[in-house]
Image (tube, grey):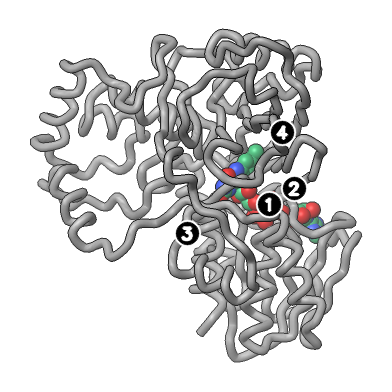
C-alpha cells in the first residue's frame, strides 16, 4: 500500500472491486467509514473467479494462499470454511532433467550451496537483480534449479527481472551477515509456521462472503458497471485498479510519476484447469511441480489440486492446474485452445504417463496477470509516495503496491485501514 488513509475524515471512495478493493471496503467500513465502492465490471472479485464443472471446481486465477494471523482472523470473522493440505501430499517437486526432485541438486552443487550460504557475507548489494544476489549467496545451480522455479511460480518472471528489495522486502541482511545466520535468526524468532490453505468452496467464496457482508452494511454503497474516468472529490481516495488504470485516473501533470507508472510491467499467464481419469495417470503425491530453467518452452508449473486438497474433483477424476507463459513464453496467450491443449497433452504423456485424453480443460488467459517486482517498481513506490500519495487520504492499493498474494493483501489492508 502506498499512502495513508485520513482517519479524521470518515468518508472514502474505493475504486476497483477486486480483492484489494473489497478488503479496503471491509476494513474501512468496520472502522465506521462511509464507503463508496465503484467497480467497472458487472461483478466483484476482479481476477478471482471460481467455476463449478461436472468434473470439479475450477479456479481461473488464485487457488491457494498462505495463512497468517490476519488471514485467520478475517476468515473466522466471515465464517469461511478452510481446507488444509492433505497429510500425505505435502511434497513440492522441481522438474529437472525430466526427473521430479524434492532436492533439485547434484551432490557437488549442494555442497557449494551450503558453503556459500554459510560463509558469503552480505555487502550493500540490494540494487542488483535477484539472480545476481542469489548466485552470490547460494551459487548458480541454486538460481537455475531453485530460485528460477520459485520466482516463476510467484511472479511468472525470471530472477533477472526481479529485485530483492522489491520482492523480498523482509530479506534485510546486515552488512557482514551470512544468509545462514539470517535464516537461523528468523527460524528462532518465528512463532508459528504459515500453512497453505484453500477455501472449501473456492477462492471466489472470499469475494461472495465479503460482498454479502458489505451489502448488509448501511455505511457501504456498491456501484457495479461503474467505470470511473476521473476521481470524484473525496478527501479519502483508495485506488485498487491495475496500475495503468490508476495512472489514467490520477491523470497528474507530473512527468516523473507518469513516466514511473509507465515503467510498471506485468507478466502474461495462461492458467489451464485439467481433469483426467484417475486410473489414467501416474504421479507422486504432492502439492505440485515447478520447472527448473530450460526444462520446457512454455510450462512454468503444475498444481496437483485434487491430490493436495479434498473436494477439488468429482469421483474418478484428478484435477490439475497447468500454468504457462510468463516471461518464459509471453506469446503463449496468443495460442489457440487446440495448440495449448496439445502442449499440455504432450507434457502429461511424457511426465505422468497419461494413457487417455484430457477429459476436460478450462483455459484462462491473462495478458496482464502479475506485476514484475523489478527495480523500476521500487522506484515507482518512492516517486508515488513523494507525489500523489504524499497527501493524507490518497492511497494506491493493489497487487503492484507491495504484495501480490492474497495473504499479503489481507495483512496490508488489515494493518493499513484499522487504527
Ligand atoms: C493466474 C493467476 C494465479 C494466481 N494465483 C494466486 C494464488 O494461488 N495465490 C495468491 O495468493 N495469489 C494468486 N494470484 C494473485 C492474486 O490473484 C492477485 O494479486 C489479486 O487477485 C489481485 O487483486 P486486485 O484487487 O489487486 O486486482 P484485480 O483483481 O485486477 O481487480 C481490479 C479491479 O478494478 C476494476 N477496475 C479497473 N479499472 C476501474 C475503474 N476505472 N473504475 C472502477 N473499477 C475499475 C477491475 O474491473 C477489477 O475488478 C494469481 C494471479 C493470477 C493472474
User: Closer to the observer: label 3 or label 4?
Assistant: 3
Task: Evaluate if marks 2 and 1 touch, with contact meaning CB atoms under 8 Å apart.
Answer: yes
Q: Earlier in the sequence, mark 3 or mark 2?
A: 2
**Residue drawn 30% across the image and 29% down it:** 132
Residue at the image position 33 percent from the left and 41 percent from the top:
127
Compare marks 1 and 4 and give the one earlier in the sequence: 1
Q: Which mark is residue 367?
A: 4
Residue 261 visible (yes or no): no
Find residue 397 and report its horizontal and vertical position in percent.
Answer: 60, 62
Q: Name the residue that disc number 1 marks.
A: 202
| Image mark for residue 67 | 3
Q: Are marks 3 and 4 in contact (CB under 8 Å)?
A: no
Query: Which residue is tagged 2?
Result: 50
Q: Is residue 305 above or below residue 177?
A: above
Q: Disc 4 on helix, strand or loop?
A: strand
Q: Secondary structure at mark 2?
A: strand
The Cα–Cα distance between marks 1 and 3, rounded to whole angstroms, is 15 Å
Q: Residue at x 11, y 29 (%)?
A: 115
- Secondary structure at badge 3 equals loop
Q: Is residue 93 visible?
A: yes
Q: In the picture provided, is 183 more to the left or to the right than 76?
A: left
The one nearer the camera, 356 or 152, is 356
- For disc 3, the neighbor class at 10 Å (few under 14, some 14 to 19, many from 20) is some
Q: Earlier in the sequence, mark 3 or mark 4?
A: 3
Q: What is the C-alpha distance between the residues marked 4 and 2?
A: 19 Å
Residue 267, quarter of the rendered image: top right
Amino acid at each position: 500500500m502506498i499512502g495513508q488513509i485520513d482517519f479524521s475524515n470518515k468518508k472514502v471512495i474505493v475504486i476497483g472491486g477486486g480483492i484489494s478493493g473489497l478488503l479496503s471496503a471491509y476494513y474501512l467500513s468496520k472502522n465506521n467509514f462511509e464507503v463508496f465502492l465503484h467497480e467497472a465490471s458487472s461483478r466483484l472479485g476482479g481476477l478471482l473467479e471460481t467455476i463449478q464443472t461436472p468434473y470439479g471446481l475450477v479456479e481461473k486465477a488464485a487457488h491457494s494462499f498462505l495463512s497468517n494471523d490476519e488471514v485467520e482472523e478475517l476468515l473466522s470473522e466471515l465464517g469461511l470454511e478452510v481446507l488444509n493440505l492433505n497429510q500425505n501430499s505435502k511434497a513440492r517437486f522441481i522438474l529437472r532433467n525430466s526427473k521430479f526432485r524434492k532436492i533439485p541438486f547434484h551432490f557437488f552443487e549442494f555442497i557449494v550451496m551450503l558453503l556459500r550460504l554459510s560463509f558469503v557475507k552480505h555487502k550493500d548489494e540490494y540494487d542488483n537483480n535477484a539472480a545476481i544476489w542469489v548466485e552470490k549467496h547460494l551459487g548458480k545451480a541454486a538460481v537455475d534449479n531453485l530460485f528460477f522455479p520459485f520466482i516463476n511460480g510467484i511472479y511468472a518472471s525470471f530472477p533477472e527481472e526481479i529485485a530483492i528489495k522489491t520482492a523480498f522486502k523482509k530479506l534485510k541482511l546486515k552488512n557482514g551477515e551470512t544468509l545462514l545466520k539470517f535464516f537461523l535468526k528468523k527460524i528462532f524468532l518465528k512463532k508459528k509456521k504459515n500453512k497453505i490453505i484453500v477455501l472449501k468452496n473456492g477462492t471466489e467464496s472470499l469475494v461472495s462472503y465479503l460482498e454479502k457482508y458489505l451489502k448488509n452494511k448501511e455505511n457501504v454503497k456498491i456501484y457495479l458497471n461503474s467505470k470511473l474516468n476521473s476521481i470524484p472529490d473525496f478527501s479519502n481516495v483508495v485506488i485498487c485498479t491495475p496500475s495503468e488504470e490508476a495512472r489514467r485516473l490520477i491523470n497528474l501533470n507530473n512527468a516523473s510519476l507518469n513516466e514511473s507508472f509507465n515503467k510498471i510491467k506485468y507478466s502474461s499467464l495462461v492458467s489451464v484447469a485439467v481433469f483426467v481419469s484417475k486410473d489414467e495417470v501416474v504421479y507422486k503425491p504432492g502439492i505440485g511441480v515447478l520447472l527448473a530453467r530450460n526444462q520446457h518452452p512454455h510450462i512454468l508449473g503444475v498444481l496437483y489440486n485434487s491430490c493436495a486438497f479434498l473436494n477439488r474433483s468429482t469421483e474418478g477424476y484428478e484435477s490439475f492446474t497447468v500454468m504457462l507463459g510468463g516471461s518464459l513464453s509471453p506469446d503463449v496467450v496468443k495460442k489457440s485452445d487446440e495448440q495449448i491443449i496439445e502442449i499440455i497433452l504432450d507434457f502429461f504423456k511424457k511426465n505422468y504417463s497419461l494413457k487417455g485424453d484430457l477429459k476436460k480443460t478450462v483455459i484462462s488467459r491473462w495478458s496482464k496477470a502479475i506485476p514484475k517486482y523489478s527495480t523500476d517498481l521500487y522506484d515507482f513506490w518512492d516517486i508515488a509516495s513523494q507525489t500523489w500519495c504524499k497527501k493524507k487520504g490518497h492511497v494506491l492499493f493493489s497487487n503492484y503496491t507491495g504484495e501480490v498474494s492474497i495473504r499479503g493483501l489481507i495483512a496490508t489492508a488489515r494493518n493499513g485501514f484499522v487504527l
